[in-house]
Image: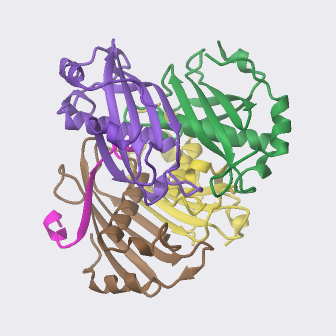
Chain colours: A yellow, B brown, C purple, D green
Amino acid sequence: MNEKDFSPYFFFERPIAFYESDAMGILHHSNYLRLFEEARLRWLRARGLEHEHYPKSELTLAVLETACRHLHPVHLGDDVKIYLAIRAQGLKIEFQYAIFTKRFEDPVALGTSLHVMLDKEFKVRRPPQAILQVLEKELWTETWR
Amino acid sequence: MNEKDFSPYFFFERPIAFYESDAMGILHHSNYLRLFEEARLRWLRARGLEHEHYPKSELTLAVLETACRHLHPVHLGDDVKIYLAIRAQGLKIEFQYAIFTKRFEDPVALGTSLHVMLDKEFKVRRPPQAILQVLEKELWTETWR
Amino acid sequence: MNEKDFSPYFFFERPIAFYESDAMGILHHSNYLRLFEEARLRWLRARGLEHEHYPKSELTLAVLETACRHLHPVHLGDDVKIYLAIRAQGLKIEFQYAIFTKRFEDPVALGTSLHVMLDKEFKVRRPPQAILQVLEKELWTETWR
Amino acid sequence: MNEKDFSPYFFFERPIAFYESDAMGILHHSNYLRLFEEARLRWLRARGLEHEHYPKSELTLAVLETACRHLHPVHLGDDVKIYLAIRAQGLKIEFQYAIFTKRFEDPVALGTSLHVMLDKEFKVRRPPQAILQVLEKELWTETWR
């Protein structure tokens, strides 16, 4: 699987910050979850759903599960491109991610995250209609490997 | 499964820092991977293996895969106790983690990570004998759920 | 000024985490502000003032100003000892910090921070009597250099 | 001083990430130093000086001193615009920063940082000619207040 296969999906791109590196000179593995989160919020913004999520709404996409597989390191100076796919699973919302840099043809990392929407009292809430309507139109083929 | 079942395993405990919280007032999910890493390095230190890992050696426990399931939030003011189990899998080393706070009887989070030892040129290296010898004596029953 | 001069002051000590390092193999400079914050909250706990601060109270020590001077790097594998002094300045509370490692006789960093207590609506509040009473007994000589 | 006064200076703009917030729902104060660092590296890139800095060169802009004054909080959902000015001071390089959001007319924060260029052995090195030539053309009026 190379980057062309991901062209139908939402992505955002940014440089790696120096403070995100570790003593190996590479992006620290905990920061991949932060890139995934940034991608989710950029996706919400791109789909006009910013008002359905904290701080513009009381709801958040709370994290139930995360997973990440690292295929190559991301070096300082690399820009990262994070692709995502999203689908509803009952009350849950599932994301998958693929990260690319120019240094490698295949993804440097693949990840998934599972969410429910929670209010400020940490009670599970049904995703708002505006989100569900967008989800119906989102592409999701199979798990990225 | 409650905390008593984990008593034969290595753990370390610490407060949650204010800067580790997010706008929900809870430990941000990316910081669980950082707690796991701290637990690994505390374990190395506790087993007298500090000299087999960067910066005292050229080798690091590079991260191939991580996963984390969140069962309860960790609130500011909570102290966390991170238990770990470890085993060799050929050239790979596998860890699993269970995090407890006083607020809940069951774990607040369960996680796993898979590693290989790499040198500074990112080449895979066999774990040093000192680590392998310790691994033979470590407890590992089944996957924590 | 060496570490003995700081012996009358509160301190706490901890290892540097791998994720706190950067590509130079040293503690990233932004993390010094995080060590200062940890020291403030450890001090509150040590003085029995935990109940006067968020999350046990609605008040926080909001940050008005920070400054840090770096005299030596902190390498991975170093443990850091953070000393602090504190005094009231009208409605404001001032802290100064000195960080030591075993590698150097003089401090590796010196810092200051200035605070007011804010409630959840970001309104300035007078520090609670319990904090003011403790502050009267705290040591403060001159600015650490 | 309002944002128009900063229009001759370099700036970059980005959203605040959820993981950069703290339990008060605002950008954690330690992250301002990270924004300053991002601004420095964006400035290097914008001036074609990326090759004079790690990882493309062995030199880094090591941090000697930082300071930050907070005038207003930055809330989640705010975008930040970071302006910077830079000048040579003998072997040292000084930056100052002003951060704006749409919520306030005056800066939300003002900061400074002082640097020397170090090689990988932490030895002080004269800034490369390419950087010094650019510095001669950079604007610096007086300290931003």
Tell me residue C3's x, y (percent).
36, 43
Relative to A114, B110 lies left or right: left
Name the image quarter holding the C terminus of chain D: top right
At 61% from the left edge and 49% from the top edge, which residue is drawn? A18
Q: Nearer the viewer, residue A61 or D122?
A: D122
Tell me residue D57's x, y (percent).
75, 55
User: Which quadrant holds residue B128?
Assistant: bottom left
Relative to D102, C99 lies left or right: left
From where the camera sits, is residue A36 visible? Answer: yes
> How many numbered tags mark residues here?
0
Tell me residue A17's x, y (percent).
62, 48
- Is the residue C53 above or below the residue A100 in the image? above
Q: Nearer the viewer, residue B106 or C22?
A: C22
- Is the residue D101 above or below the residue D126 in the image? above
Q: Which residues are magenta?
A: B1-27
At 22% from the left edge and 23% from the top edge, which residue is drawn? C131
B6 in the magenta segment: yes
B124 in the magenta segment: no
At 68% from the left edge and 39% from the top edge, which residue is drawn? D40
User: Which quadrant holds residue D35?
Assistant: top right
- Is the residue C120 above or below the residue B26 in the image? above
